[in-house]
Image (spheres, helix red, strand yellow):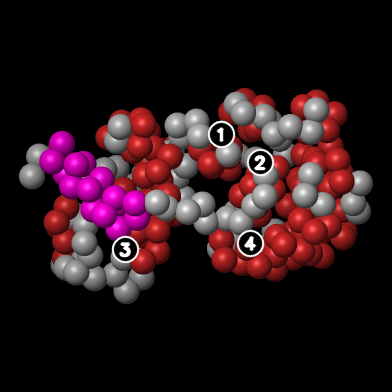
Amino acid sequence: MNKNEKILFIISQLESLYSTPAIPLQHVNDYTLLIAVLLSAQCTDAKVNEITPRLFSLADNPKDMMSKDVDTIREIIKPCGLSPSKSKAISQLSKILVEKHNSIVPDNFEDLENLPGVGHKTASVVMSQAFNIPSFPVDTHIHRLSYRWCLSNGRNVIKTEKDCKRHFPKHLWNKLHLQMIYFGREHCPARQHNPRVCPICSVVGRKSLFK
């Protein structure tokens, strides 16, 4: 199987399994998506979805959130981990959105990545899922799958993102990153993974996986 055939096979398999992948993080607007993605750092989406209803009942827009005490925010989001830094970032970025962006979440990488607590991966998720701008956010699942499928060398997520963008058609990036996340969770986990029965690794996986 040559490179093009492998890419087409991966796309076909993912499409057959997840033709309409849902956005994993529950949200009601661009702002709440941004906050949910920020909270998901070193935390599972499931845990974030448990926490955010209470947080967003407190405030679901930057103007209301900036008026809340940081300690109140911290107490709500504590189960997500890193609550001291995340609560400060939520408060600060909400104030910046109000004062500099008319309470609107920016639709460009530069402004997003200048917000407290927002790195490239968070910005990529927002660009992709809120604004449908082609992006390829790389989380632990995508990083792992890209290495197993010989799409990248596993050196770092920056390299993985570049390689995924190089291999896959741009118009599919937004959908593919979600499909890969779901596939990683259900068929290609980090532990107790059997490459011989994995729908994709069994065909295009690294030989080292089978040792």
Q: Residues within 10 Å of mark 2 (few under 14, many from 20)?
A: many
Instruction: Please state which of the two labelled residues, at mark 4 or mark 1, is closer to the viewer.
Output: 1
The residue where tag 3 is placed is 188
Give the residue drawn at x 26%, y 54%: 16
Q: Residues within 10 Å of mark 4 (few under 14, many from 20)?
A: many
Q: Earlier in the sequence, mark 4 or mark 3?
A: 4
Instruction: Please state which of the two labelled residues, at mark 2 or mark 4, is closer to the viewer.
Output: 2
Q: Earlier in the sequence, mark 3 or mark 2?
A: 2
SS assignment at label 3: loop
Q: Earlier in the sequence, mark 1 or mark 2?
A: 2
Residue 96 painted magenta? no
- In the rendered structure, the answer to whether residue 123 lies left or right of residue 163 reads right
Q: Earlier in the sequence, mark 1 or mark 3?
A: 1
The image shows residue 87 at horizontal and vertical percentages of: 78, 53
Residue 10 painted magenta? yes
Relative height, residue 185 to residue 152 (above, below)? below
Q: Earlier in the sequence, mark 4 or mark 1?
A: 4
The residue where tag 4 is placed is 48
- In the rendered structure, the answer to whether residue 188 lies left or right of residue 28 reads left
Q: Quadrant of the C terminus?
A: bottom left
Real-space CA distance between mark 3 and mark 2, rounded to the nearest whole angstrom: 30 Å
The residue where tag 1 is placed is 131
Amino acid carrying mark 1 in the image: Phe
Q: Nearer the viewer, residue 126 or 38?
A: 126
The image shows residue 209 at horizontal and vertical percentages of: 21, 62
